[in-house]
Image (cartoon, helix red, strand yellow):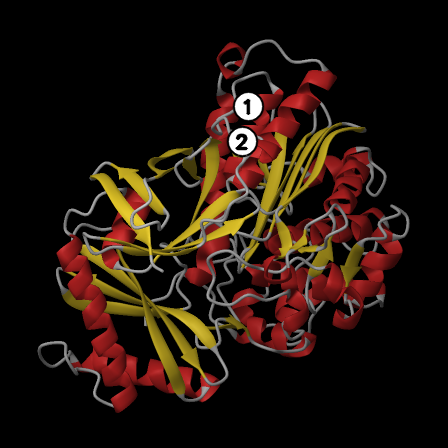
Amino acid sequence: MARTSGMTCVIRSIAGIVVFAAIAAAPAAAQSPAPLAADSVRRALTDYADRAEALGVSGVLLIAAGDDVLLHRALGWRDPARRVPNDTTTLFYIASMEKQFIATAILALEDEGRLRTTDSLPSFFENVPSDKRAITLDQLLSHTSGLGLYGWDPVRRDWLVEDRDQVVHGILQSRPAHPPGSQFDYQNVNYLLLAAVVERVSGLTWGAFVQQRFLQPCAMRDTHVGWDPRVVRERMAWSTGDESEVFTMADRPASWLRLGRGVVMTASDLYRWIRAIDKGVVLSAGSRRKLFTIHASLGTGYGYALGWFVRADSTGAPRVAFHGGDYGAYHSEMRLYPPSGRVMIALTNVGYRGRSITETLLNGAVMVSRGSPSPLPLLLSRDAVAEDSLAGEYESAAGGTMLVSTLGSSLVVTPVTQRAVDWLTHGDTAGWSARDIAGRNALRLVDGLKAGRVDLGLGGPLRADLRRELDAEWSGLTRVGGRLKSVQLLGTAPGTDPGEQLSLLRLKFERDSLLYGVGWKDGTLAYTRPGVRNVIGTTVFAAAKRGDWVTYDWTADTLASVTLSRGHAVAKAPSLVVHSTDGDVLFTRRP
């Protein structure tokens, strides 16, 4: 059925350009007061990091001005289940940020005269089909080759397990999405072919090339390419947050579609790498300029360079280069401001309702480092927060139920019923009845799929094409996961289009677990989506004053309208009051 999760990185990267472009283009006087002294910046950033952690951020933040590290701070939990906190040696999977290693490798080989970026694919691969013979390395580097998506398995919700030759053959034999050079289309396949070129030209495996040419000379001892899961597992951050599955990359199979298991590294090693590029340690001056020159324009003054998105001035010189990476709840972002050498890094292992928070997180760090007020709310210090536990299951007389747990000094609230979902996600229960019905119908749909009758409980037969797609999808899910063991309705949220609703179910099979989205349009089944992002999720409330908690909407970059406060004990049971645009709702803890 319809699926968009494979395009998450593309959408976020382009959105990042638009949002950041607006910040970078603002007049200096409007951006902030006069610059702060270094010690004041350190204090402001430390306070900002404290607030971010209390509001649910988990990962590592590193902010530096050239060689002066202003903040290097670990936040949250490496492994929440075992209460193991993150520290500055925690390893994070960087996903698509590996592309800048690949782009640098190609330019390093060009510096040595072993290839040219104007070379076309037949210079490196045999039996290249005629529709791809004109594709050049430049086009691969700038995502203008015309190649489309390859290798994503929608049933397993992961990349196929294939070796290098299988991947290269599959990409070359796949149908192109566009004519070469005609338009920008961010696709991983471009950089997979480039990594294969590096191997063929250098005679080394990709991991060995990176180790010998980059990691050893730059003293990057905490970066792992082609790594052994047994060696690094205990140092890896777990992908947590709102995903249906908690995992580390050590649990994922190696595949050339992610260059083995991808790159895992610390924020400090990523900082060393960015500084080495900026200071011209790994590339010639000409290649460094080429690396940061826009090759695929995405608007006035910004576009894709080689492995980096770039915002440039009127002369084409880069003002900021940046890139992100997303996989599960691993979300990362790096920024380099070439004129000043400022570096900003966020490596996280948590999202916010299925989306990355790194862009908002770094934008806030920019603000406070320039002397502007913190966008995050003022919170109580950890020492001032009452230690008594409010954990438990709470219910309201209006029909809402929510689960409350504690994480450090914060409260983590998970809605259980549709009314609680509405109160916690958008503070308004208007139309909740239609969403409640949609959720119940989603449960009936799954019951029908399990029984072999997809129209069971949906009030009539389905279109023949929709029925076939559902049957094929369910057959694939049960083939991979085995027998369905349990179903949990998380709730229904408004969709992106008028009249659209999205019901979320957690399906547990014998060998698999996933979030299953059921989309409705004007009350009629419109699509299903295995592996959908959790747009409901949990809400982290931080103590603003004794007995009061606030939360932050990381997607809207604003203080959320929903707050919590301690209520009066009812029959000696603790209570919490949810304050929303719908009014105040009293929740009392069950015995």
**In which quadrant of the rendered image does the C terminus lie?**
bottom left
Secondary structure under tag 1 reads: helix
Is any part of residue 366 visible from this angle?
yes
Q: Is residue 338 above or below residue 2?
A: above
The residue indicated by pointer 1 is: 367
Q: Amino acid at mark 2?
A: Asn
The residue indicated by pointer 2 is: 363
Q: Is residue 190 above or below residue 250?
A: above
Q: Residue at x 25, y 90 (%)?
A: 452
Seen in the image, is 246 located left or right of residue 567? right
Q: Position of residue 566 (x, y in %)?
A: 37, 39
- Quarter occupied by residue 84: bottom right
Seen in the image, is 271 located left or right of residue 213? left
Secondary structure under tag 2 reads: helix
Q: Position of residue 550 (x, y in %)?
A: 41, 35
- Quarter occupied by residue 63: top right
Residue positioned most to the left: 460
Q: Amino acid at mark 1?
A: Met
Is any part of residue 182 visible from this angle?
no
Q: Position of residue 394 (x, y in %)?
A: 33, 55
Check if mark 1's residue and mark 2's residue have beta carbons within 8 Å: yes
